[in-house]
Image (cartoon, rainbow, N blue to C red):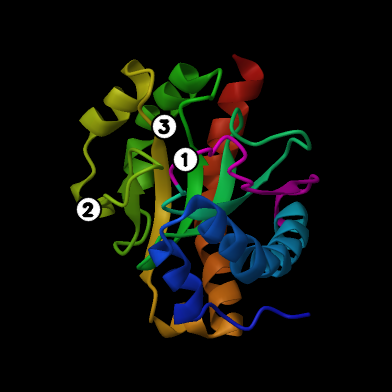
Amino acid sequence: MAFTGFIKHDFDTFQLNELDTRMEAIQTRIQPKFQEIGSELVDYLSAQLGNEVYLHIARHARRTVNPPNDTWLAIADNKRGYKQHPHFQVGLFDDHVFVWMALIYELPYKREIAKSLIEHFDDIKQLPNNFVVSMDHMKKDSINLKKLQKKQLERFRDVKKAEFLIGLQLPFDDTRVTDGDKFIKTVKDTYDKLIPLYRIALQSRITK
């Protein structure tokens, strides 16, 4: 079944207060759509990258009290997991969708990857002006790429919990979110622009 877009009902999931209620809504409203999106993106990225990648859908298994404020799918070149690897994400908060190339704090070679990104800082700044950067995947906060400075990448290098995610944030009512075909095209276009950075991160992981 083809992905037809996200609707307000999906985002309203994050207004449900109880853990079990919100988790059930994530599983029934959002995760089937993640499966549809992810299946197409895995095929696309495998072809673009020339190697196999794997879909991971967040299960929030460690949650016992507080319900998750967001949920996501991740695509990585490791079948067992994604957190310790450069990966791509698509996910939802209550008011927007995020489309990231993600480097999070669990990366074993985070320092080496950060050094490579700093060396390619000028290339990062050449990405589209509507791209944004997040330094913490748990928060909504982001900065516009135009405002990114080397000191943020240096923090990513030097601070254990610091992260670096780059891509797009789209409001929940944007037609690129509510129209399935537009959404898939937007995500693919975004990833096309981020693949060079992803390759840099992979190479740093492999060679260090």
Mark 3: which amino acid? Answer: Leu
Circle 3/circle 2 CB separation < 8 Å: no
Q: Which residue does the image show at 48% across and 22% down from the upper left?
A: 110
- Closer to the observer: label 1 or label 3? 1
- Give the Cα separation between the discs numbered 1 and 2: 38 Å
The residue depicted at 59 percent of the width and 14 percent of the height is: 208
- Residue 153 is situated, as x and y percent measured from the top left of the image, at 31, 30
Three-letter amino acid code at the position of disc 2: Lys
Q: Residues in magenta?
A: 48-66
- Which residue does the numbered mark 3 point to in the structure image? 117
According to the picture, the residue beneath numbered tag 1 turns out to be: 65
Q: Is residue 95 above or below residue 139?
A: below
Q: Earlier in the sequence, mark 1 or mark 2?
A: 1
Instruction: Give the Cα distance between marks 3 and 2.
Output: 16 Å
Please name the residue that numbered disc 2 is placed on.
Answer: 146
Marks 1/3: CA–CA distance: 37 Å
Identify which residue is drawn at 49% across, 83% down: 178
Q: In the rendered structure, does residue 58 fall within the stretch colored magenta?
A: yes
The one of 192 and 106 positioned closer to us in this rendering: 106
| Mark with earlier residue (3, 2) | 3
Measured along the vertical axis of the image, is residue 2 above or below residue 79?
A: below
Which of the image's four quarters has the N terminus? bottom right
